Image (cartoon, helix red, strand yellow):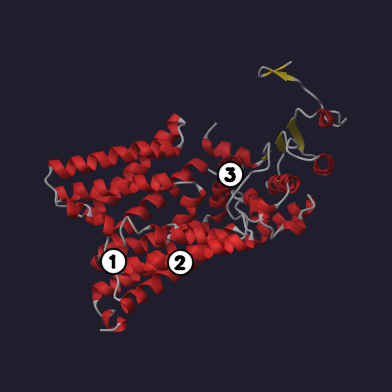
Amino acid sequence: MNVFQALSYAPILRGFVALVLAGCFFPLAGVFILRLNLVTLRFTLMHAALLGAAVGLALHADPLLVGLALDLVAIAAISRVARESGLALGYVSTFFMVLTIGLAFAVIYKAGVPAKDAFGILWGSIYSLSRLDLALIALYSAAIVLFVSLGFTRVSAVLFHREIAWASGVHEAALTSVILLFVGVAVALLMQLIGALLMDSILLLPAIVSSFRARSTRGFFIQACVIGAFCSITGFFTSFALDVPASSAVTVIAACLLGVGLLYRRFSGRKA
Amino acid sequence: MGSRQWARGRRRVGYVHQESVQVDFPISAREVVEIGTATLGLSRADRRRRIEEAMAAVGCSDLQGRMYARLSGGEKQKLSLARCLCQDPQLLLLDEPTSSLDPRSRTELMELLRTLNEARGITMVMVSHDAQVLSEPAWEIRHMEAGAFA
């Protein structure tokens, strides 16, 4: 069966469309993570989603939706605590990261949830997506594109310098909360799509490679999307050609691009 | 004062940071100036015109496509001024704007501030420890000690 015959099957077509959408638009959230130094927050959200999966399985509910809900709760709690306490986002994220993973293991043990089912969220599977999953990914893609394109100047102000954004009349606290929300939803959706362990290939690596070449913030966003789209589409077709999982093919291609980007940076002398 | 009034008030007050902002991500000089138009609700054409006028007023028109991270401290401070000018400010707050500049850039910046003050009538409040800056006759000087004017 070749790739085009495979695409006539609904689960595979859904997986392909979801992968292309994620590749094209989720790197926008990667730019936020990279610029606002939210790598710790990303790990916290992965752990919160794992807790959500455990709770969902214990309650016989959709693990993705419960994980998504817990990610939103974690985002709200982290941004509130960081704002009220004046503590750095990294410290607050670390507290919630440890708390959620501890609670996840407690729920898995107490509720008798099979650990392999709960930890299944670490692997993800693009071919097991439901129509609802695909609809959520499409909705998220549209929302983040509109957010970045319509609010570009305000968003770039917050990414540039929060104090200067505030002084320019931008509601930087509210905008930062929205940015954190977009990061949280991206993490939850990508865990279902390609798993926690491989999500960097779509979320972060395109943004990192883009940062090596781009000369403007507009270019940064656009190049991250183009690189993400390239990785996801070529990864999908490569997975069929070499008979390997799509998520690992996407990840290897993204890693190779990062290697090329690092060489470019090394030999072009580009520092920033 | 409500948050909306605060935000509206901030639009008419320009703020120049103490040191040029250090960034390690791609942003162009033009995009930094564009931040000044973020909340003005201008059309695309008006925004473009205002950015170009502000950059011309501080003598930075040739920097538009350059990466901010690769500019000198003096150029970055001029861009900060251009960003503020986009807001058409009534008041300009300058927090030790010359502290990280070499003598030549400092002189250029002070001349630029004087020109803007004369041409646009913008009131400027500057904090400085720089004796040479404070010796300028145009400034009315107030000494501050322990958080209060002496």
Residue A206 location, x and y as percent? 47, 62
What separation in Å lies between label 3 and label 2 (alpha carbons)? 32 Å
* Residue B45 placement: quadrant: bottom right
Residue A220 location, x and y as percent? 55, 60
Amino acid type at image mark 2: Cys
* Disc 1 to disc 2: CB gap under 8 Å: no
Q: Nearer the viewer, residue A172 or A26?
A: A26
Amino acid type at image mark 3: His
Marks 3 and 2: which is nearer the front? 2
What separation in Å lies between label 1 and label 2 (alpha carbons)? 22 Å
Q: Which mark is residue A256?
A: 2
Residue A111 left/right relative to A160: left
Q: Residues within 10 Å of mark 1 (few under 14, many from 20)?
A: many
Chain letter for the residue marked with disc 1 in the picture: A
The residue at 71%/51% (across/down) is: B71
Mark 1 / mark 2, whichever is N-terminal: 1
Q: Nearer the viewer, residue A246 or B136?
A: A246
Q: Which mark is residue A13?
A: none
The residue at 36%/64% (across/down) is: A138
Q: Which mark is residue A126?
A: 1
Chain letter for the residue marked with disc 3 in the picture: A
Q: Which mark is residue A161?
A: 3
From the image, which quarter does the N terminus of chain A lie in? Answer: bottom left
From the image, which quarter does the C terminus of chain A lie in? Answer: bottom right
Mark 1 / mark 3, whichever is N-terminal: 1
Residue A142 left/right relative to A107: right
- Can residue A84 be seen from the camera position used here? yes
Which residue ends up furthest to the right in the rendered image?
A: B137
- Vertically, is A21 above or below A154? below
Residue A77 left/right relative to A152: left
